[in-house]
Image (cartoon, rainbow, N blue to C red):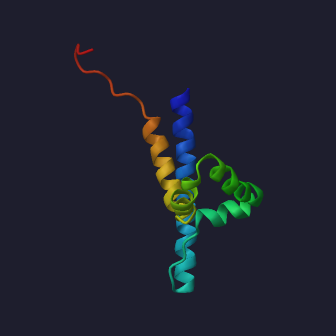
Amino acid sequence: MIRFLMRFLGLWILAAGFIFLIYDGTKSIAGNALFLTRVQDVWGSMHQQSLLSLKPSIEKVAGVLWNPVMTTFLDQPVALVLGLLGAAMLVLGRKKRPLIGYGR
């Protein structure tokens, strides 16, 4: 059941990453320049309050995690992040290979 859920969510997340890839591609073609939608822009447009409350909570736990780690994550393209997350979930949810012979 968990494997099915991981594969199902992985496919949906991978599809969302592909949609953002198409969105950025059409925007880049229309604007004749490279446009990439950042994670921070999408997160801010979906729920601004959680993005604003993220920095104080991370700095409270470990102050060094905000500047190099989270700022780098928030500046990445959404298509890349969703693609990697979806692929990782698909790999984690894959079926086990059948055993060949008597090797257990």
Question: Image height check: is 37 above or below 16?
Answer: below
Res 92 quadrant in image: top left
Which residue does the image show at 56% across and 85% down from the upper left? 31
Which residue does the image show at 34% across and 28% down from the upper left? 97
Task: Pinpoint residue 5: horizontal percent, then vertical percent.
Answer: 57, 34
* Nearest to the observer: residue 60 or residue 90: 60
Task: Pinpoint residue 22: horizontal percent, then vertical percent.
Answer: 54, 67
Which residue does the image show at 57% across and 48% down from the upper left? 12
Task: Pinpoint residue 62: horizontal percent, then vertical percent.
Answer: 58, 49
Which residue does the image show at 63% across and 53% down from the upper left? 59
Instruction: Decide if residue 43 is on the left or right side of residue 32.
Output: right
Farthest bottom residue?
A: 32
Question: Image height check: is 33 above or below 20?
Answer: below
From the image, which quarter does the C terminus lie in? Answer: top left
Farthest right residue?
A: 49
Q: How many marks?
A: 0
From the image, which quarter does the N terminus lie in? Answer: top right
Question: Image height check: is 10 above or below 43?
Answer: above
Task: Pinpoint residue 38: horizontal percent, then vertical percent.
Answer: 58, 67
* Nearest to the observer: residue 40 or residue 99: 40
Question: Image height check: is 31 above or below 54?
Answer: below
